[in-house]
Amino acid sequence: MIQLKDIVKIYPMGKRELKVLQGINLTIDKGEMVAIMGPSGSGKSTLLNMIGLLDRPTSGSYILDGREVSKLNSGELSGVRAQKIGFIFQSFNLIPYLSALSNVELGQKYASKVDSRAAKEALAVVGLTDRMNHRPTELSGGEQQRVAVARALAKNPPIILADEPTGNLDSHSSKDIMSILTSLHKEQNITLVMITHDPNIAHYCQRIVHIEDGLIVQEETK
Ligand SMILES: Nc1ncnc2c1ncn2[C@@H]1O[C@H](COP(=O)(O)OP(=O)(O)OP(=O)(O)O)[C@@H](O)[C@H]1O
Ligand SMILES: [Mg+2]
């Protein structure tokens, strides 16, 4: 379970301060599928990076599965992150000179869970068994994002965080990615938190959280 209490993030900008998150209170239960929406610059990625332990709040409390993680040092943070969090980014973030399979295995390496069979299984889940030895340049955008999903999946994390996972994809590939993520969430009870600008994509989620200027302004639950 993810519990954020009064999360504030301030970036020092010379003499001024930029208060990007202004007191976020959000609880996400295990197995929920949540969309975060809001205007550009409203703090969505900052919030997701915080949830994913890529960043620490300036103040506030973050309890992840019963443990206060907001004050861990960076070594401890990467340990928790490696065990619990799979990330999917808008720009795929694949290593260009490695095959699809090696990219997936690299994701496992950070979590010390290298397991070639699990990596191949993850590529099978996203329908890329026959593209396993292709490099990113030899894959379509939709296929590259499926590799990124497989990479997040292959270490078997309880939580997957996705920052505009369909932002660079056409509507057909977007639907593919969303149906893969939806079935993962349903079959493996993975907690899924994703940012999107697209209401059609957000509606795959049971819960939509709207953010403006670093604050939650509205929540919808289906
Ligand atoms: N490292 C940083 N230092 C200073 N300001 C930052 C930093 N990272 C982000 N910001 C600022 O924080 C605000 C929120 O950024 P964030 O990336 O969270 O927005 P977003 O809601 O994800 O926007 P988008 O939809 O465009 O991706 C922006 O105004 C941005 O300029
Ligand atoms: Mg963003």
Image (cartoon, rainbow, N blue to C red):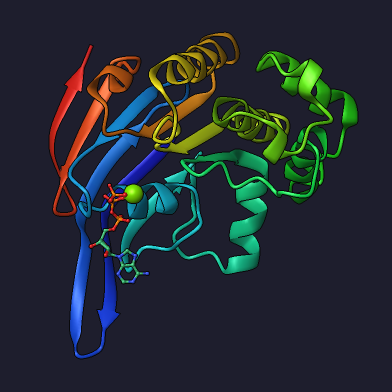
Residue drawn where x is 22% and y is 49% of the image: 40
Q: Is residue 139 above or below residue 107?
A: above
Looking at the rendering, the quadrant in which ligand 1 lies is: bottom left
Residue drawn where x is 16% and y is 28% of the image: 219
Position in image of residue 137 (x %, y %): 68, 40
Residue drawn where x is 63% and y is 57% of the image: 78
Quarter of image, res 74: bottom right
Position in image of residue 47 (x %, y %): 34, 50
Residue drawn where x is 20% and y is 78% of the image: 17
The residue nearer to you, when weighing 47 against 172, is: 172
- Horizontally, residue 206 falls left or right of residue 219, namely right
The residue nearer to you, when weighing 125 against 35, is: 125
Instruction: Report the quarter where the C terminus lies.
Output: top left
Instruction: Report the quarter where the N terminus lies.
Output: top left
Quarter of image, res 70: bottom left
Count all numbered tags in the image, as a single digit. Answer: 0
Q: Is residue 44 above or below residue 20?
A: above
Position in image of residue 202 (x %, y %): 29, 22
Residue that sits furthest to the right in the current view:
116
The residue nearer to you, when weighing 52 against 195, is: 195
- Horizontally, residue 188 falls left or right of residue 163, namely right
Q: Is residue 19 above or below residue 188?
A: below
- Horizontally, residue 96 falls left or right of residue 41, namely right
